[in-house]
Image: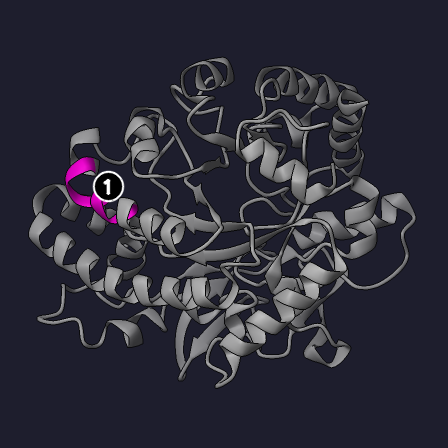
Amino acid sequence: MNSRERIIAAIEHREPDKVPVDMGATPSSGISAIAYTNLKKHLGMNFGHTRIYDVVQQLAQPEEKILEHFGIDVVDIGRMFNERDDHWYDIQMADGQQAQYPTWFKPRARENGSYDAEVDGMVIAHMPAGGLFYDQTYFPYLNGYPSNYKGLPDAMKKVLWSALVHSPWDHAQEPDFWDQLRQRTLKLRESTDRALMVVCGCNLFEWGTFLRRMDIFLMDVFVDQDDVKALLEALMEIHIVTLERVCAAVGDIVDILRFGDDLGMDSGPFMSPEIYRDIFKPHHTRLNEYVHQNSQMKTFIHSCGSIYKLLPDMIEAGYDILNPVQTNCAGMDPVTLKKEFGEDISFWGGGCDTRDILNNATPQEVKDHVKARLEIFAPGGGFVFNTIHNILPDVPPENIVAVFEAVQEFND
């Protein structure tokens, strides 16, 4: 099998020739720029650049030689943008090492060593001195819902996740963007046998938190459901247009479309299954149906936290793939997940605990942990190996190497 065949077989619950692997195909399955730089130094790979394609989370875009070295089976089509050296400029990361930002991102440095990101002179995000990512500081609907949603697109442009968006969406305002997206994706398809991913977002619950602020929107979900439902209807109008354009441009080339909507915390979901069914599930179902009816793409949902209680409904809503499979949260035991849901949804993640193991254990302990996860998730397909969310800056490079050595040894 080649990489694309391996990924598709796994998603379709056919056991592939070996467990497929991801690192960097999404902004929830990637590697921080600091960890990436340390990894390259550890491997003696003194080439290229650390390019921070996701400036909010400070994630690096893995280079081709790194993808080859670790046997990565899937890539994000966004890597086909910002491909020239003059699309980037040098910066210094929090640990003093050099990296590069895309030229469109010019944060304002403050005297205390912190940075602000601005839109039209308004500070929308902040990274403190020595910080490792940007925090949202501006919430357009903080003081209440609008009387109508004509201004929703403009409000969304002032939220960091939209204003500071990663490729290819940092080019979305260019007049020939959709033609560019197709042509660049065709070029990528011709040059690699890896599976292709498009990151599409279309968040619903999360957009409520971005617009209203987390604490306020959580209360709204319980006590102001009419306004929540009206907001979601307005968001869906925008999301369906996006999906129409994505499916028309690359739906016959790309293999996986990644949605996002964090629905869980450590102890359980943010809402009861009953509320999810009433407010969010109908829209999630519509998003999945549109993609499945208008493209060849499988649908991937990134949803952090303990979502065990919501999984039956999320599966009914049509998701093909679940990420990051946060097994250190309540009810998310790997054995239980594989037994109860392994035939109905594919797990993309859960392969290594990034909260306690990857950053703190010895390389041998990391290997043992990863192999134990592979023994649980791999049989029968339905599994793409990835760590639980992004590899963070404090992870020793020896432990990153141990992760992929464990996968290779398991596959051999």
Q: Position of residue 314 (x, y in %)?
A: 32, 35
Which of 45 and 253 lies nearest the eye of the viewer? Answer: 253
Task: Classify the position of the N terminus by image quarter.
Answer: top right
- Write down the region rendered in magenta: 277-284
The structure residue drawn at horizontal position 38% and vertical position 62%, both measured from the top left corner, is 243
Local crowd size for mark 1, using a 10 Å CA cut-off: few (<14), some (14–19), many (≥20): many
As drawn, 194 above or below 338: below
Which of 188 and 387 lies nearest the eye of the viewer? Answer: 188
Is residue 280 part of the magenta span, yes or no? yes
Q: In this view of the protein, can residue 354 be seen by the observer? A: no
As drawn, 48 above or below 357: below
Callout 1: SS: helix
Q: Locate residue 391 relative to residue 140 in the image: left or right.
A: right
Location of residue 139 (image quadrant): bottom left
As drawn, 175 above or below 299: below
The structure residue drawn at horizontal position 66% and vertical position 40%, both measured from the top left corner, is 5
The structure residue drawn at horizontal position 68% and vertical position 22%, both measured from the top left corner, is 370
| Amino acid carrying mark 1 in the image | Lys
Residue of label 1: 281
Q: In this view of the protein, can residue 292 be seen by the observer? A: yes
